[in-house]
């Protein structure tokens, strides 16, 4: 082996050794590093999720149908919501889990135990009012009036041209948006001013997806695109072209368009002109 080849081999070995000696995971928050191409999909079925490379907290919260601020607060994550590979993200607070468990025990086990002890003469207990639940219900009523106000401040536009082939459904497993069909490559535009908080293909069932944050309450989502023309952390204006229509995970070319209010899907037809 020549001296030149030996030197080259040593150099390659040194580079590999240096790369493998890095310690600590690199952050995967796309708001800091830009969009990343991933091959696996975010699919949340339980009360927590293990972060993979390319994930963002916005994408995780969107997939879990939760407000990103709620998920961030549960996990003690501050803006700009940087997360790391293998980090465990909890999707439900310990307080809420405890309340659910208490309701379950009171409704299914406790009455049976009382019936056994009283010989079948079971007297139904009067439920004590829960102050926290009352506060939450009162807050939700206030949010209804606030939501219309924050939505009215936005100037909504139709995200694309085409035929609405599927509408919004309030059913539990119903379609949570509008499906607008047209030919492949049709321009997709931002429905209102905002900032791109996700651009990628890691969410199961959405294909190439863009999520735009409009204010603290509202997000809009644009799914099944053939091309993404914007990057995360990029400001966009209403009517600005952000993608081109595609047909991922579907037999027809169509846009799946959603509007989320604090993580929950709402009917886009109630906002569009």
Image (cartoon, grey):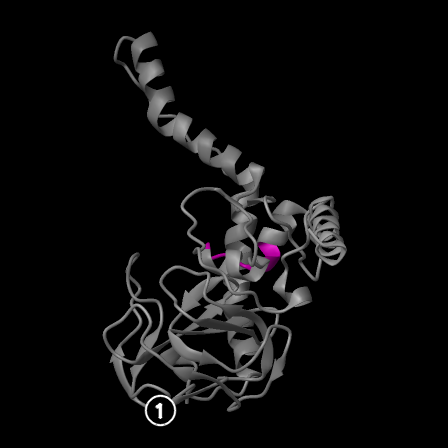
Instruction: Tell whether 199 sits left or right of 43.
Output: right
Q: Residue shown at 49%/86% (left/top)?
A: 156
How far across and how far down the image is residue 38, in percent?
49, 60
Residue 6 highlighted magenta (yes or no)? no
How far across and how far down the image is residue 116, in percent?
30, 10
Extreme residue toward the front, this view: 2
Q: Residues within 10 Å of mark 1 (few under 14, many from 20)?
A: some
**Disc 1, SS:** loop
Instruction: Tell whether 80 sits left or right of 45.
Output: right
Query: Which one is in front, 116 or 6?
Result: 6
Q: Residue shown at 39%/68% (left/top)?
A: 207
Q: Which quarter of the figure has residue 206?
A: bottom left
Query: Which one is in front, 57 or 266?
Result: 57
Query: Which one is in front, 266 or 203?
Result: 203
* Bounds of the magenta segment: 64-70
Instruction: Tell whether 64 sits left or right of 179.
Output: right
Q: Which quarter of the figure has residue 259?
A: bottom left
How far across and how far down the image is residue 230, in percent?
56, 80
Instruction: Look at mark 1 in the image and give the residue it sits on.
Output: 161
């Amino acid at each position: 082996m020549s001296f030149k080849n030996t030197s080259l081999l040593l150099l390659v070995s040194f580079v590999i050794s240096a790369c493998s000696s890095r310690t600590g995971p690199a952050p995967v928050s796309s708001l800091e590093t830009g969009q990343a191409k991933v091959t696996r999909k975010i699919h949340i079925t339980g009360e927590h999720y293990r972060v993979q490379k390319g994930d963002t907290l916005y994408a995780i919260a969107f997939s879990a149908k939760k407000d990103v601020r709620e998920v961030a607060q549960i996990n003690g994550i501050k803006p700009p919501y940087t997360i790391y590979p293998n980090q465990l993200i909890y999707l439900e607070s310990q307080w809420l889990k405890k309340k659910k468990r208490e309701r379950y025990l009171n409704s299914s086990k406790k009455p049976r135990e009382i019936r056994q002890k009283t010989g079948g003469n079971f007297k139904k207990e009067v439920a004590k009012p829960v102050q926290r639940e009352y506060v939450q219900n009162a807050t939700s009523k206030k949010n209804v009036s606030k939501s219309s106000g924050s939505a009215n401040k936005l100037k909504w536009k139709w995200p694309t041209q085409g035929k609405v082939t599927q509408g919004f459904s309030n059913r539990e497993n119903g379609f949570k948006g509008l499906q607008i069909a047209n030919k492949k490559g049709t321009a997709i535009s931002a429905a209102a001013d905002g900032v791109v908080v996700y651009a990628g293909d890691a969410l199961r069932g959405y294909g190439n997806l863009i999520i735009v944050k409009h204010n603290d309450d509202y997000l809009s989502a644009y799914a099944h695109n053939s091309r993404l023309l914007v990057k995360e952390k990029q400001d966009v204006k209403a009517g600005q072209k952000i993608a081109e229509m595609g047909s991922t995970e579907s037999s027809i070319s169509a846009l799946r368009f959603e509007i989320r209010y604090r993580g929950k899907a709402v009917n886009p037809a109630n906002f569009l002109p």
